[in-house]
Image (cartoon, rainbow, N blue to C red):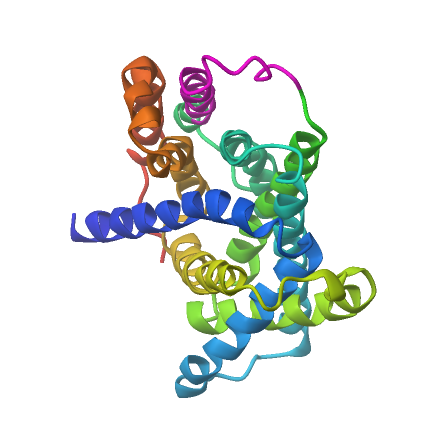
Amino acid sequence: MKWLLSNNVLLLLWVSLMASSFVVSADLVPYANSITSTGLRFILASIMMIPLVAMNYRPMASLKVYLHYGLISLFLVLFFVGLFEALKTTTAMRTSVIYTLVPLISIVFTFVLLKAKTSRTKLLGFILGSIGAILVLLAFNQDNVDFFSWNSGDSIFIVACFCLSIHVVLVKKWGADVPPIQGSFYIMVLGGLMLLPFMAIFGELDQVAWKVSEFWQILLYLTVFTTMATFFLQQRLVQKVGPNQLLAFTYLIPILVVIPQGWSAISHLKDSVSGILLTLLALYLISKDQKAIT
């Protein structure tokens, strides 16, 4: 029971930070392009993590581990670049709902890469969770005539979600023997190194709002809370509860995304009761048979 409570609290913290990422990332779009925004996050996070990693550093077992983490980092880089690109032509709310497709996508990659099958109960939970997220979006977009249109950003973000699904499953496959802080550090360092040449060529560095304080405030928030903190929590939780349980909590993201929008958005909660109830039922079905992974 203590294990279950502890992990669920961490899962709620992780998903809350992830939800804030969709809203805050949209605010960063006017100040820097997607490649530079992602690269700066990874580089700043790597620098900030150095003291923590130095205190408990453990050398990698082999070059193969670095190659594995290079792939893990690559797919996460692609996700973040995709998110920033998508937010140019779609909304934070729409991306938050599309994001809830990640658990269903991960089922396929979990089977392919980990040879792990998903029970019918959990599969039903994933399907209900996606339906619940769509109902929540409908409730909060009743007056939006463009709701049923499809933006290029929506397509970009679906591809990004495929990349994130692969990333999470690879963390489970290759990251079990690496401490969470150290694993997060390697992901950030390798991601930053990958992006450096692309930042120099395609990053439009001369157009970045370097002198605008709001740019740095948003960037620091994304670096500390939605990069460093979420990376660490994700590394730890994937090892403890597995990728399916982790991603199941993403069904809460559409609900959490609307909270910062104020009372006008919260007033729509009564119209989304069915979606919220389906989401909670989905979490129950997915997690009720979950056991500790050691």
Question: Is 4 rendered above or below residue 280?
Answer: below
Q: Is residue 9 left or right of residue 100?
A: left
Residue that lies at the very extreme toward the bottom in this rendered image? 55
The image shows residue 207 at horizontal and vertical percentages of: 72, 61
Question: Is 152 rendered above or below residue 194?
Answer: above
Examine the image and state in which quarter residue 85 appears.
Answer: top right
Residue 169 appearing in the image: yes
Q: Is residue 155 left or right of residue 42?
A: right
Q: Is residue 25 left or right of residue 86?
A: left
Question: Is 16 rendered above or below residue 37?
Answer: above
The image shows residue 52 at horizontal and vertical percentages of: 41, 80
Residue bounds of the magenta highlight: 126-149
**127 is within the stretch colored magenta:** yes
User: Residue visible at 65% across and 17% down?
Assistant: 149
User: Residue visible at 48% across and 58% down?
Assistant: 218
Residue 112 appearing in the image: no
Closer to the camera, 202 or 280? Answer: 202
Residue that lies at the very extreme toward the right in this rendered image? 201
Closer to the camera, 278 or 214? Answer: 214
User: Residue visible at 62% across and 68% down?
Assistant: 210
Question: Is 138 rendered above or below residue 17?
Answer: above
**272 is within the stretch colored magenta:** no
The image shows residue 257 at horizontal and vertical percentages of: 40, 36
Quarter the C terminus occupies: bottom left
Examine the image and state in which quarter residue 250 appears.
Answer: top left
User: Residue visible at 73% across and 70% down?
Assistant: 196
Closer to the camera, 279 or 84? Answer: 84
